[in-house]
Image (tube, rainbow, N blue to C red):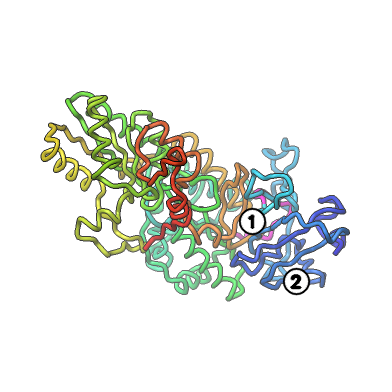
Amino acid sequence: MDLSISSPFRGAFPAPTSTFILNPKSRCSHSLNFFKHQNSYSKNPLFSRQKIPIRAQVSDPAVDDGFVIDDVPHLTDFLPDLPSYPNPLQNSQAYAIVKQTFVRPEDVVAQKIVVQKDSSRGVHFRRAGPREKVYFKSEEVRACIVTCGGLCPGINTVIREIVCGLNYMYGVDDILGIQGGYRGFYSKNTSTLTPKVVNDIHKRGGTFLLTSRGGHDTQKIVDNIQDRGINQVYIIGGDGTQRGASRIYEEVEKRGLKVAVAGIPKTIDNDIAVIDKSFGFDTAVEEAQRAINAAHVEVESVENGIGIVKLMGRYSGFIAMFATLASRDVDCCLIPESPFYLEGKGGLFEFIEERLKENGHIVIVAAEGAGQEYLAQSMQGIDEKDASGNRLLLDVGLWLTQNIKDHFTKEPKMAINMKYIDPTYMIRAIPSNASDNIYCTLLAQSAVHGAMAGYTGFTVGPVNSRHAYIPISNVTETQNTVKLTDRMWARLLASTNQPSFLNCDESTGGKVCKDTIDLINNMKITSI
């Protein structure tokens, strides 16, 4: 198939090389959208919309470099006669100095940046940014913003920059704030958002729009969207919230509504898949260091001081790991991905005793999800979930504190001074730092550009430091977790000199045995 026939990719790729494969894994039924230009797919029989991988081969059919596009839906997929309009940014004074104002249709972002010679080029996502054509007139837009789930530094910055982006860049004046999470669509009044209203909310923690867990009723939400005449929906929340956003998009498509649904992924734990990191994470790590420093000061000031700091990390230990690496005052870091044990050779008790004898104090950082299976064996487990469907966890910090006390009052009968710090809500409630403020601005503007360009059912985020539009299913199917076989965890172990709590094979120079590595690689952290 000659890609130069009636295609936006004319001259974009060298003639005799690539094979394009559209990702069959994506749940999006519109993955072939990448190859269409406005409504050209309906006029060009060369392009199919089947849910199967399709290869558009060029002159050499033997060449297959495995170039895969994982695309996002577009409003014209189910509203093929939708008109487009020139982007108002072409007359923007701010963008007048930009060498290339609009993202080219063929621009993509590679998910895998490190490749070997002759290896597959892999999965690519559509690059985020302003398009030359938009599918909404500014005066016809009625947008809404909703925040769901737990708190996270930076939520207010995202809200502010969505409002300012819509207003300053696209001239949109009609923007609503949905109060109280998903249930706010049908049980709360909305507020009108303007740049003046949201001017200084980025200086505050929490969410200006209020939040809640659960309350998702797709039919009621879409009914409300339809009744209010809303045609752009911006949804800020974690994986459960994004799954809800996906269902809203599906219902919107089913009803044939001209409504763009854009997700902005939020989780302080950094457990969103695909994207480089989640907003608020840098702020959380920075603030976590204050708690670690306080614990270190406390235990240095007493004899045999043991400080335990519990940080966020229900299923992923990124905050604990990065705060440990950043502080350099931590002796041991416990995370959900790495099993540990207390008693016996190589156990935590032995390590604490050795470190106390060596330094006179020890600081332990524990992610909230660490050792939950161990806790369940020694304590009465709680088989309950919160409104978001997350399993309620036992308090690993208090459990560790009590077990360490019990151990050292028996054998070896060493006098210890315990200090326990839980800064969880203090970290969640602070405003975002400079780094996260910039990041939140880019996320918000990318979402606005995508919605105005007619994309829907997508989420935004950086992939290898380039912002991209990603199918929502890609960020909700799995969770991002610390890989114990990667170098970052090895750097932590080298920094703290703590035990790995893994079985090692002495015959291979202390290397972890293959069975243990296989167990780690196949480990799947779930939210049940």
Q: Check the image and report above or below for 477 versus 106.
A: below
Q: For this view, does 106 lie left or right of residue 268?
A: right
- The amino acid beneath tag 2 is Ser
Front one among 50 and 17? 17
Please state the horizontal and vertical placement of residue 221, each as a whole percent of the image.
46, 69
Q: Tell me the crowding category of disc 1: few under 14, some 14 to 19, or many 20 or more residues within 10 angstroms, Cα based.
A: many
Name the quadrant of the C terminus.
bottom left
- Image quadrant holding the N terminus, namely bottom right
Residue type at mark 1: give it: Met
Residue 321's place in the image compared with 120, above or below, is above
Task: Please report the residue visible at 34 percent of the width from the left and 45 percent of the height from the top.
Answer: 367
Other residues around mark 2 within 10 Å, as few (<14) / some (14–19) / many (≥20): some
Label 2, label 1: how far apart the Cα atoms are = 25 Å
- Work out whether 417 lies above or below 276: above
Place residue 202 in its image quadrant: top left
Question: Callout 2: helix, strand or loop?
Answer: loop
Q: Report the residue marked by disc 1.
A: 452
Question: Is residue 192 something that shows in the picture?
Answer: no
The residue carrying mark 2 is 48
**Percent from the top left, x then y, of residue 403?**
18, 45
Residue 486 is left or right of residue 256, and the answer is: left
> What range of the chain is rendered magenta?
127-141
At horizontal 39% and vertical 60% (from top left) the residue drawn is 527
